[in-house]
Image (cartoon, coloured by chain):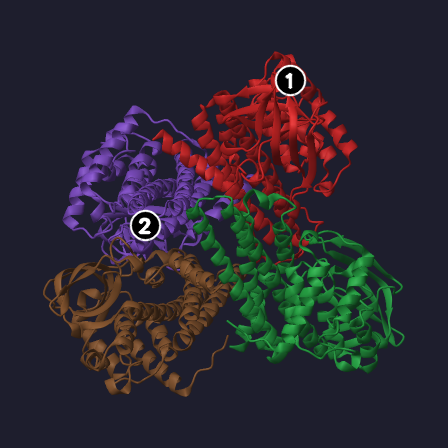
Chain colours: A green, B red, C purple, D brown
Amino acid sequence: MDFSISEEQLQLRDAVKRFCDGEYPQERRGQPVSIDRRRERWGMMAELGLTGLILSEACGGSDLGMVEQMGVLEELGRCLSPEPYLSTAVISASLIQSMGNAEQRERWLAPIAAGELRMALALDEPRGRYAYATMACRLTPEGDGYRLDGEKCLVLDGPYADAYVVAARHEGSLQLLVVPADAAGLTRTAGTTLDAREIATLGFAGVLVSPSQHLAEGERAEQALQAVLNRASAALCAESVGAMTELVEQTREFLKVRKQFGAPLGKFQALQHRLVDMVIALEQSRSMAALAAMAVDEAGDRKCLKLVSAARVSVARAARLIAKEAVQMHGAMGMTDECQVGHYVKRLMVTERLFGDVSYHLESFENTTATAA
Amino acid sequence: MDFSISEEQLQLRDAVKRFCDGEYPQERRGQPVSIDRRRERWGMMAELGLTGLILSEACGGSDLGMVEQMGVLEELGRCLSPEPYLSTAVISASLIQSMGNAEQRERWLAPIAAGELRMALALDEPRGRYAYATMACRLTPEGDGYRLDGEKCLVLDGPYADAYVVAARHEGSLQLLVVPADAAGLTRTAGTTLDAREIATLGFAGVLVSPSQHLAEGERAEQALQAVLNRASAALCAESVGAMTELVEQTREFLKVRKQFGAPLGKFQALQHRLVDMVIALEQSRSMAALAAMAVDEAGDRKCLKLVSAARVSVARAARLIAKEAVQMHGAMGMTDECQVGHYVKRLMVTERLFGDVSYHLESFENTTATAA
Amino acid sequence: MDFSISEEQLQLRDAVKRFCDGEYPQERRGQPVSIDRRRERWGMMAELGLTGLILSEACGGSDLGMVEQMGVLEELGRCLSPEPYLSTAVISASLIQSMGNAEQRERWLAPIAAGELRMALALDEPRGRYAYATMACRLTPEGDGYRLDGEKCLVLDGPYADAYVVAARHEGSLQLLVVPADAAGLTRTAGTTLDAREIATLGFAGVLVSPSQHLAEGERAEQALQAVLNRASAALCAESVGAMTELVEQTREFLKVRKQFGAPLGKFQALQHRLVDMVIALEQSRSMAALAAMAVDEAGDRKCLKLVSAARVSVARAARLIAKEAVQMHGAMGMTDECQVGHYVKRLMVTERLFGDVSYHLESFENTTATAA
Amino acid sequence: MDFSISEEQLQLRDAVKRFCDGEYPQERRGQPVSIDRRRERWGMMAELGLTGLILSEACGGSDLGMVEQMGVLEELGRCLSPEPYLSTAVISASLIQSMGNAEQRERWLAPIAAGELRMALALDEPRGRYAYATMACRLTPEGDGYRLDGEKCLVLDGPYADAYVVAARHEGSLQLLVVPADAAGLTRTAGTTLDAREIATLGFAGVLVSPSQHLAEGERAEQALQAVLNRASAALCAESVGAMTELVEQTREFLKVRKQFGAPLGKFQALQHRLVDMVIALEQSRSMAALAAMAVDEAGDRKCLKLVSAARVSVARAARLIAKEAVQMHGAMGMTDECQVGHYVKRLMVTERLFGDVSYHLESFENTTATAA
């Protein structure tokens, strides 16, 4: 289960680690932070080359792939980073890079690489969560563009995003659009997730969309959406692996302290076995996440979806095991907010449900298998 | 599994329900509330006769038993009430009533019944959570009283309590004392639990304790402590049953809405089966909680401990099942803070660890069985 | 969870225990036994009054209820008795006693009480297991009686039964009939269950059924069938409680031996906790089984079905926990046939699926609740 | 998770598959078979080159590695083959090949390759299962050889083996010896495992062991024993993957039939999701087994042990999930002996406990990690 890592990847990883250690010290994880501080951090991440990691050099990016990005995501997951890295630098960046024309790429990607722009994906809708085939957001022709009406919800990082990639339909055909946050007719309502991240509900009332805001439509849009959802799922696997790594580490530390304080050795051994169980589950998740990342970079669409869905299901199962054991092994301490364990458990619960839950991914896996047969 | 309920109990229950519906409307549960509002609520609970429920009429109480109190606790659990009912009206009230002399009862119990005083139990210590036999808090004779030194932690409702029942040791002998919050040498640090309730760490640096503050010592104190821990455990079972009832209800409602929105009927049936599983687990917990309450009122110490520990273990197992299923069946909604499910899950996780976790109660159960044999 | 037991019940229980200790010594449980020996045992059970326990004194019975019969069933389950007690003395006896006319009761019940007759219930069908509302076995009028055609399967104790109670339909109306094993047109094929008990598939090809073989039809038959299925479920709960009791005992003994051989004490304590978990699950099952038995004797139909289904689900869940833990705690020994644990686990797996599995009983529970609401 | 397979491996696999289809038709799996038939089969396996697969060409073998042998083991596991392939062609063959001198290799390996000899490993002892460091079987010097005294148990395939590799100690130093089944002073008692395979308890009373029967001693023997246990564990993983594959297939078939018979589609979809869960668990096990096989062929000792132990734990966990789901999804059918599911479940339960159970392998994993750190 060892996947060798290049020197360049190691250096990147080290830089991210130093950033995280400085910005997210253990006792502050899971705590609120000011808007200004977050904007500042986003700039720091851009300076490290993180926000443009997968963007072409023409846009100020580093032209790296999903495999490299996974290392960044794992570190961010490990310290519960609340920055909009997934929304902006993974999802929006790859969608615009692959679907956008030259003008659009320049308009949106350079600012992302420079850390000046944060974006979010507006996909889920109130009545049809994960039901991406039956969206109610609709476009009506207006001049040489469209009017957009409808509602989007569960938009991660939505309350402070500068612009949105929006999925809507016109006569059944999927359309992917970019809509700035200050568009006339767009209202947003802020909410929070269980793990205290920010989500928005967006209302579109006759929002005008010009041709320059169109990224893709029809079959091409469907494929682009599926590809970016695969990418997002691989990214979520990496984030979860990071969070699980930290839970395992904290549990290991806690057991050491407990041992010092004179718990009977035998009991300690029984707990030690449970810790090893957690380690094995973590290592399997790491392998699955790595395979998913490779699939995003290299495999065909169907095979990619299959591997990514398998990875989401496996990682979710491992995360539940590790979360349950971490909480239980911390005993009474596990119920205090001071103990970090609760924050990680909540993060893992939320991550499990972003862009498809276990049931959704079991169905995806089944569909790819069934059609392939 | 039906335990018949008297007319009086029903009226009490209705009054509590009305109070809860008014004070804890669904959308506010789990949210912060001002100190003044909480003080006001405590007064309202006193007016309803809740704070003095098990106190003698001489102290302004209603002279009822644990069985009646369970109904109150279940309702409070059902709406995630954060008031210090367990700490004050269950634990402190019963300890002082059973151990205190006439003067102490008058000094502390009348204000509790009147809703003018809130108390908390200072029992756990940093190095020996649940290790009640080896407390490090110590007493040193001073004049006709003692000096108290040491540290207590995880004191539920501790940050705003007016006084504490403290457990400490003098030459190995357990002592139970009442210490006012404003005693010289007492410092308190506020913290929070995962479910956002308040806990305190208390530091005692040569706090003077006069004879009038002594409740009990030696074997009598040991028995009183065990008896009140049994009572607290039965109370926690009732609280959890309330919270589980609400989780089951909310999941049932969610499924109805989901059905309306046109989920395929068969899938709905599979979910329905899982809901029934939750209902059965809830009903078993309700039975176990009722048996535990009866045991507190009537059974001998050993049998009571055995039943109470069995109830804690059973209720914890049911709570985990119900929490897991409620979260999973809510799908994507389960990850938003707007959805109440997360608050209930956190409450159940914390309740499971108060005054002994599953491992502690398995050991208690085993010890009573082993010694009895 | 204590249900007091009368002196008479205790004596009966003791007699059954002595019979079981003599006939089913531990090392022989789960092993094959000769036909003659089994016939002999059936006679011994009749002499003890077990086969006619719930029959009226007129038929040579003891006129006792389900509560008393549960003690017998628990002991039989405890020693993995393979005798057709459930099929004959619980199911067939109660059906004929409640539905049969005087002549039928004399014809069939006296020999059951005397230990001269063994019967079985032919209910399940190949395509519709547990789908009792849509049976394909059909009756065609012939003279003043019927011709019976169709197939029955999973007939427990079927290969050596002397007669069968058969459920079939005529123009949609349920009919309950008694058919002797030697009826012309009846063929039987023997099979075995996972736990090595005997089941039969019965083929009916124009088997003639005279009016004297009719027990009930229409709504009366539906109610009788539901009532006897409730009774069978309560009986299966008692049998499982017996088997679980033995699994817990054998695990306790194994741990003692393991301790003697010098396992580290701490590890032993961790195992001890898991044993206590098993004990608590067993005690809950015992309570549920007792409630189900009382419901069979006293409650109305709907409430009975609800309690019985809840009991089946709870007992199945406890049985899985206890079986899993017993196997795991026996370590390497658990894989040998010499170790009894495997036989008990297989018995519990089979019992869980007789006359409705967990899914079937979750649906029953739901239906009673839904209709009642 | 795709590991590419060479043309040669595919041909071998096909040959094994044809042999298995012919010799182990589905309805006969798990059933007893005559001694003569088994001897005949062993000859057929030799003709296919299976018994000498990893032996050098000098001994009549094919000089292939663990990776190739895994394909054979998976097929044998898939059809519940009861032949002593693991004992003889994996364990004994590799031990003698790596430790034996030229004379010993000729004496024992050529007959194994020719299908004329069956061997078994005598390792476990009654009081110290899996406690390989503290064996009680002892050697006493006698002439230029030793006398062997003690008892071995759980010797898989022991009742009909022609010779044994025995592990014993002399003054603390581990010794590996070959002892023919007809040695004077050797008694064997046959037993069976839960899945009806044959095991023996061997008694050694002053059995004379000449120098020519010595394979290795001291540190060299310890390393050889650990290496062969790693190999056996990898082999068991492959066998289990085969058995799990069949369970998944049979469950898939059963669902298809159930669907035909008109189960509501939605329910079927919920079951389909559970089937996908089984598939993902199976695929992960297949990957882990493949990694373990590669580690046996290529990795250093410590890394090999770590990977192999992780594989055993992961495969055991997947096997439990798959076994549980297969049984439950077969509903009532799952309780009949006619249904193959029960046989596979029992095989998986036994395999989980051969040469170390989950607890043993968690400890191995932990030890390699701890020492490495």
Left or right of B195, for residue B130: left
Q: Which of the two residues, D144 or A111, is positioned nearer the viewer here?
A: D144
Q: Are marks 2 and 1 in contact (CB under 8 Å)?
A: no
The residue at the point 29 percent across, 44 percent down is C260
Residue D79: image x %, image y %? 33, 71
Question: How many angstroms separate mark 2 from mark 1 (CA)?
Answer: 55 Å
The numbered dot on residue C347 is: 2
**Chain letter for mark 2:** C
Q: Which of the two residues, B101 or C186, is positioned nearer the viewer here?
A: B101
The residue at the point 31 percent across, 35 percent down is C71
The residue at the point 55 percent across, 69 percent down is A288
The numbered dot on residue B61 is: 1
Left or right of A162, for residue B241: left
Residue A204: image x %, image y %? 83, 62
Left or right of B133, for residue A93: right
Q: Is residue A78 above or below residue B179?
A: below
* Amino acid identity at mark 2: Arg
Density class for disc 2 (Cα within 10 Å; few <14, some 14-19, many ≥20) is many
**Chain letter for mark 1:** B
Residue B279: image x %, image y %? 54, 43
The numbered dot on residue D371 is: none
* Amino acid identity at mark 1: Gly
The residue at the point 56 percent across, 18 percent down is B99
Residue B367: image x %, image y %? 41, 34
Whether residue C292 can be seen here: yes
Secondary element type, mark 1:
loop
Secondary element type, mark 2:
helix
Q: Is residue A223 above or below residue B99?
A: below
Count of numbered badges drawn on the protein: 2
Q: Which of the two residues, B111 or D36, is positioned nearer the viewer here?
A: B111
> Which quadrant of the structure image shows residue D232?
bottom left
